[in-house]
Amino acid sequence: MTSDEVVVWSVPLPGAARDGDLALLDDAERARADRYLRPGDRASFVAGRAALRRVLAEHLGVGAGAIVWGRAPCPGCGSERHGPPRIADPPTPLTFGFSRSGAWALVAVAPSGPVGVDVEALRTLDVRETAALSLSPRESAYVLGLPHEERLRAFHRAWVRKEAVTKAVGVGIATDLRRVDVSPDRTGTVTVRCDAGTGPDTWTVTDLDVGEEAVAALALPGTPRQPAIHARCWGTLESRKGIR
């Protein structure tokens, strides 16, 4: 990858446990897996973490089980106990973003610098109630002003953009999402400003095409630009078009 390239991997997640996945995880990941009560949720978590390891191992040239996780300092308070995840070993400048929802996981890999990605399977929810908690007044007015059948996708589009940005910043959704305006009335690539944390406050957010049943977005630092995004599906290991 060059400095202007990002690789986004899409990985199908099974509905049941798969041989070999659990063996790749470390003790902390296995402990997290054990806290899931439903077998399907546990399988999805294990498969997602294994997928993240396999994708990064492809870029690093190491075994998937050999990757050691660490944390960067929290952009809000400086603590490394709850900062954004990073690769502690092997030493590498590579950075990554990770998200899973429903039947898919996304892994974004960048040569360096912050990157955030989020995918959400469309699910039924009270858009009006949830918008009051997570959308800015302008966003809320736009989403709730749409025909009823269009509101759900528009809300999810706003949500994944916010998640992608706050993950890239390193603060996650602990910040007040109502202060992060992501222009859900526009599709494609938008500029988002987020003053949480100590990193860049301007982000380029690009919609990712993941089909009709989900929405996704990628966040990179900087002013509007068209990043060179390479989309790959782990199931085929073939580059494909479809990200816009």
Image (cartoon, rainbow, N blue to C red):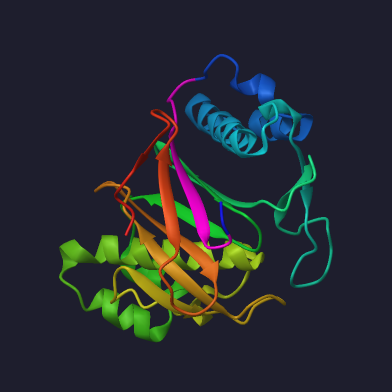
Position of 104 with respect to 96 (left or right) is: left
x, y (%) of residue 168? Answer: 60, 64
Q: Nearer the viewer, residue 176 or 114?
A: 114
Give above or below for 50 relative to 165. above
Give above or below for 166 relative to 99. below
Q: Which residues are magenta?
A: 3-16
Is residue 11 found inside the magenta-colored segment of the image?
Answer: yes
Q: Looking at the image, which residue sits at the far bottom?
A: 138
Q: Looking at the image, which residue sits at the far top?
A: 19
Q: Quadrant of the C terminus?
A: bottom left
Give above or below for 107 relative to 128. above
Is residue 224 found inside the magenta-colored segment of the image?
Answer: no
Q: Residue at x 64, y 22 (%)?
A: 22
Position of 128 with respect to 85 (left or right) is: left
x, y (%) of residue 17? Answer: 52, 19
Q: Residue at x 54, y 29 (%)?
A: 47
